[in-house]
Image (cartoon, coloured by chain):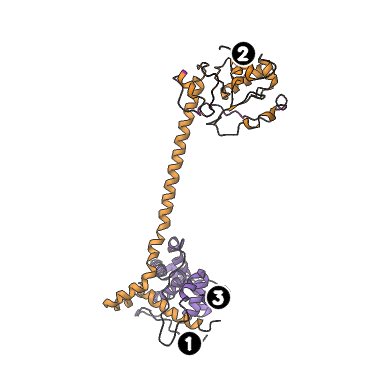
Chain colours: A purple, B orange
């Protein structure tokens, strides 16, 4: 894995706010939460969960800022808000890979293979390997220990490799 | 191994990010910036596989609501049916004492009470309505007088049914022991001796009468007519046979 520094803040709202304020926190957390929820539930429900979590955060601002891990709590809030919708969700739907000129796709099964992972494994794999978060950041976002995140990563990547090679 | 997997994953992350942003992520202004007509087509292409989710995720509620409604209807129907079948039983129990011996040898086994309705207009219409008392039909103490011949009619043992239909069908039997849900000429003889309307069907009323008779005569109270009860009733000691029936049909 190359040590490419990805721009994590792409897609971020240009909120002209003071660093450290609640608006800055929401602007940063919403991007991370959106990626985590989209990785977990697919595009549409993930976006909806993220908006629910952000709405809850704005409504419970003081309560949230007193927490040690507010982003992890918001991740829980978003999961609870879409629980009824994802109860019978068979597989999350992701957009297909976009081929580019210098990169020919060996197969088109990556999004299908990702959809076959479990939610925890997919969240870990996509946050760490697709979006480039560090282990500690991803673990804080998912509100799990780093060792658990590594377990999800190892098993998820192994399964992903098998699925991609089979396809 | 797939060395390109991480590279693909990184590209895929960007693709997902774009799709999420265009799908209405908190980065709302970015979506508004792309206000060209062609973008809507791109959005539709990106969101095309996502659309069935909205249709799919509401389906469980409909299924649950439909299942609950069906369950409620079934339960209500069962309750109504139970009440309808229980109320005629009492009417049958009262009315069955008036019926006279019209039936000598009914051949069918399923609907024995249809003939009785002709004689007693007060009786009700349910053919299974003879049940009033849920007397345990196979008591564990039915031993001494009936064990010798109990193997002769293994199929006539009454099954432990719920109260409404005590006897779903009457089995012809003229051998010891004559018990609940039997029919035939021997039952007619027993009923005639007990002072019941001799219709030839060993129902709960007949069984209760047999039990009363056994209690009154110091016999074992089991509701079964074995050799001891048979002789105590004053019937032919040689046993219940169809030939003995024809000679001694009494008038009640």
The location of residue A3, given as percent across then percent down, is 50, 87
- Left or right: where does residue B24 sit relative to residue B112? left
Residue A162, by quadrant, is bottom right
Residue at image position (39%, 76%) is A27
Residue B216 in view here: yes
Q: Are marks 3 and 1 in contact (CB under 8 Å)?
A: no
Which residue occupies the foreground of this view, B151 or A17? B151
Which residue occupies the foreground of this view, A135 or A108? A108
Q: Residue A162 — which label?
A: 3
The location of residue A112, given as percent across then percent down, is 47, 72
Q: Residue A4 — which label?
A: 1
Question: Marks 3 and 2: which is nearer the front?
Answer: 2
Q: Is residue B100 above or below residue A132?
A: above
Q: Which residue, given by chain and number where applicable, does mark 2 sit on? A: B247
The location of residue B157, given as percent across then percent down, is 63, 31
The range drawn in magenta is: B119-148
- Left or right: where does residue B135 sit relative to residue A98? right
Please tell me how crowded label 2 is: few (under 14), some (14-19), or many (20+) other residues with Cα within 10 Å. few
Q: Chain letter of disc 2? A: B
Residue at image position (73%, 25%) is B144
- Left or right: where does residue A147 sit relative to residue B142? left
Callout 3 and callout 1 share a chain = yes
């Amino acid at each position: 894995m190359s040590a490419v520094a990805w721009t994590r803040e792409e897609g971020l709202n240009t909120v002209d706010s003071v660093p450290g304020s609640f608006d800055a926190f929401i602007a940063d957390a919403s991007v991370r939460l959106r990626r985590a929820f989209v990785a977990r539930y697919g595009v549409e429900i993930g976006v909806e969960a993220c908006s629910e979590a952000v709405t809850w955060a704005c409504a419970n601002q003081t309560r949230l800022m007193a927490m040690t891990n507010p982003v992890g709590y918001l991740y829980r809030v978003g999961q609870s808000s879409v629980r009824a919708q994802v109860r019978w969700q068979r597989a999350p739907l992701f957009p297909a890979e976009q081929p580019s000129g210098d990169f020919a796709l060996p197969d088109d099964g990556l999004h299908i293979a990702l959809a076959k992972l479990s939610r925890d494994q997919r969240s870990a794999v996509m946050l760490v390997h697709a979006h480039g978060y560090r282990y500690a950041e991803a673990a804080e976002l998912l509100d799990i220990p780093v060792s658990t995140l590594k377990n999800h990563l190892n098993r998820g990547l192994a399964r992903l490799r098998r699925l991609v090679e089979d396809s | 191994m797939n060395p390109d997997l991480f590279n693909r994953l990184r590209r895929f992350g960007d693709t997902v990010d774009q799709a999420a942003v265009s799908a209405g992520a908190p980065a709302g202004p970015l979506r508004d910036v792309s206000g060209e007509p062609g973008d809507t087509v791109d959005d539709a292409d990106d969101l095309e596989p996502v659309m069935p989710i909205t249709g799919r995720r509401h389906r469980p509620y409909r299924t649950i609501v439909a299942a609950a409604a069906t369950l409620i209807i079934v339960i209500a129907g069962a309750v109504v049916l139970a009440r309808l079948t229980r109320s005629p039983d009492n009417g049958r129990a009262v009315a069955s004492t008036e019926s006279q011996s019209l039936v000598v040898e009914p051949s069918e086994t399923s609907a024995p009470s249809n003939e009785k309705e002709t004689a007693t207009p007060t009786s009700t219409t349910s053919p299974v309505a003879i049940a009033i008392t849920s007397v345990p039909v196979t008591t564990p103490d039915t031993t001494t007088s009936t064990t010798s011949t109990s193997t002769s009619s293994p199929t006539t043992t009454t099954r432990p049914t719920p109260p409404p239909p005590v006897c779903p069908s009457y089995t012809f039997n003229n051998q010891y022991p004559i018990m609940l849900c039997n029919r035939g000429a021997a039952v007619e003889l027993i009923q005639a001796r007990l002072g019941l309307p001799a219709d030839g069907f060993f129902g709960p009323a007949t069984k209760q009468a047999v039990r009363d008779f056994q209690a009154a005569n110091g016999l074992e109270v089991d509701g079964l007519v074995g050799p001891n009860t048979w002789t105590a009733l004053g019937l032919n000691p040689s046993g219940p046979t169809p030939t003995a029936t024809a000679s001694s049909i009494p008038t009640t």
